[in-house]
């Protein structure tokens, strides 16, 4: 319990900008739970252009990103105006995007690429503006983190490496928009899922790119509290980062080759190797935590 408390304390917000973003994360976490209930009442209808899965998935994703940026801001130099402006801009723009997605779902309208009627096209355009502002906030956080880097070497690597992958995800997102717009122009219909080739799911590498940073940050927090020495910590974080990057590379290759994420292809070998590397790294980190907890228990029992 003491170890869990220490991890929780390391993840909790400290300064006001981080608390603002954590508040937004909590709100969208509640939104995800509410929409899970709506999804259940709708018969768990997961697929399709209009489904409560969208507010569920986007609420969870945005909650994670808001909390992540908040955690990063607490580890950068204390610049209240800059951090406050970034936090409020990110919170408002992200809330507009996810709020519009939820609104369209409750209206029974597709939220993405729905430009066939003027009112829906206006909503999609507003979402696009919000995504543009979100992208600027994330890129701005990466630039700030690269110029005034976090003092802790592990945190620095996790933050800058993770944000670099997030930026890659922004590029993949732009590709998804182009694919979706091409589909609408060719078919005069809204795509249920944006695909490349026969079965390549474009949002697969997009999601992978956006959420590696949470894996890196949590790994870093656990390593700093665990029993691994400094060199072992660096090795494990590098293993987790490069293995996760391998997952992104092969997820992208799987998609560009026109295959679904679950299809067995030559790219699947790389995907499995990446997952295995992340698993090995996390196992070592957890074992270090267990060893540290056992040592603390032994000391306290004497």
Image: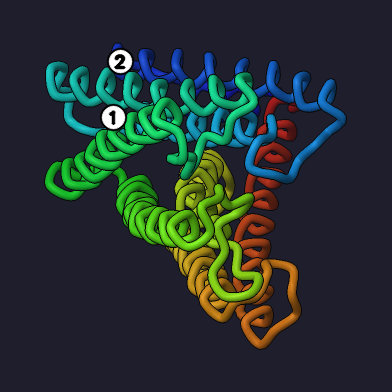
Q: Nearer the viewer, residue 100 or 164?
A: 100
Label 1 residue SS:
helix
Residue at figure coordinates x 73%, y 45% from the top left? 47
Q: Which mark is residue 160?
A: none
Residue 21: percent from left, percent from top: 38, 20
Q: Which mark is residue 73?
A: 1
Is 55 rendered above or below residue 48? above
Mark 1 touches mark 2? (CB < 8 Å): yes
Label 2: few (<14), some or many (≥20) within 10 Å? some
Residue 284: percent from left, percent from top: 64, 58
Is 67 rendered above or below residue 157? above
Q: CA distance from mark 1 to mark 2?
A: 8 Å
Residue 173: percent from left, percent from top: 40, 53
Q: Nearer the viewer, residue 295 or 10?
A: 10
Residue at figure coordinates x 46%, y 49% from the top left? 210
Residue 291: percent from left, percent from top: 69, 47
Regarding residue 264, the answer to whether it shows in the image is yes
Label 2 residue SS:
loop
Q: Which mark is residue 15?
A: 2
Residue at figure coordinates x 27%, y 39% from the top left? 132
> Dividing the picture into quarters, in which one does residue 54 lie?
top right
In this rendering, position of residue 143 left or right of residue 52: left
Label 1: few (<14), some or many (≥20) within 10 Å? many
- Count of number-bearing discs: 2
Q: Nearer the viewer, residue 143 or 6?
A: 143
Q: Earlier in the sequence, mark 1 or mark 2?
A: 2
């Amino acid at each position: 319990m003491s170890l869990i408390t220490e991890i929780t304390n390391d993840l909790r917000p400290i300064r006001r900008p981080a608390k603002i973003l954590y508040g937004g994360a909590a709100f969208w976490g509640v939104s995800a739970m509410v929409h899970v209930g709506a999804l259940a009442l709708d018969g768990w209808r997961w697929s399709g252009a209009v489904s409560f899965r969208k507010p569920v998935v986007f609420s969870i994703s945005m909650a994670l990103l808001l909390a992540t940026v908040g955690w990063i801001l607490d580890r950068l130099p204390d610049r209240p105006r800059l951090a406050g402006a970034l936090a409020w801009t990110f919170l408002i723009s992200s809330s507009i995007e996810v709020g519009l997605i939820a609104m369209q779902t409750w209206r029974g309208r597709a939220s993405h690429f729905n430009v066939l009627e003027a009112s829906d096209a206006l909503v999609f355009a507003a979402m696009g503006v919000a995504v543009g502002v979100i992208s600027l906030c994330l890129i701005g956080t990466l630039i700030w983190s690269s110029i005034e880097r976090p003092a802790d070497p592990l945190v620095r690597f996790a933050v800058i490496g993770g944000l670099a992958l997030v930026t890659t995800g922004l590029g993949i997102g732009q590709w998804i928009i182009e694919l979706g717009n091409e589909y609408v122009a060719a078919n005069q219909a809204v795509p249920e899922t944006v695909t490349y080739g026969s079965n390549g799911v474009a949002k697969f590498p997009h999601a992978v790119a956006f959420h590696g940073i949470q894996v890196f940050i949590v790994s870093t927090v656990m390593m700093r509290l665990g029993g691994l020495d400094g060199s072992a910590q660096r090795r494990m974080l590098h293993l987790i980062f490069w293995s996760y990057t391998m997952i992104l590379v092969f997820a992208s290759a799987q998609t560009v080759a026109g295959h679904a994420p679950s299809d067995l292809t030559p790219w699947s070998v790389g995907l499995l190797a990446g997952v295995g590397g992340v698993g090995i790294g996390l196992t070592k980190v957890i074992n270090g935590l267990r060893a540290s907890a056992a040592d603390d228990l032994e000391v306290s029992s004497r």
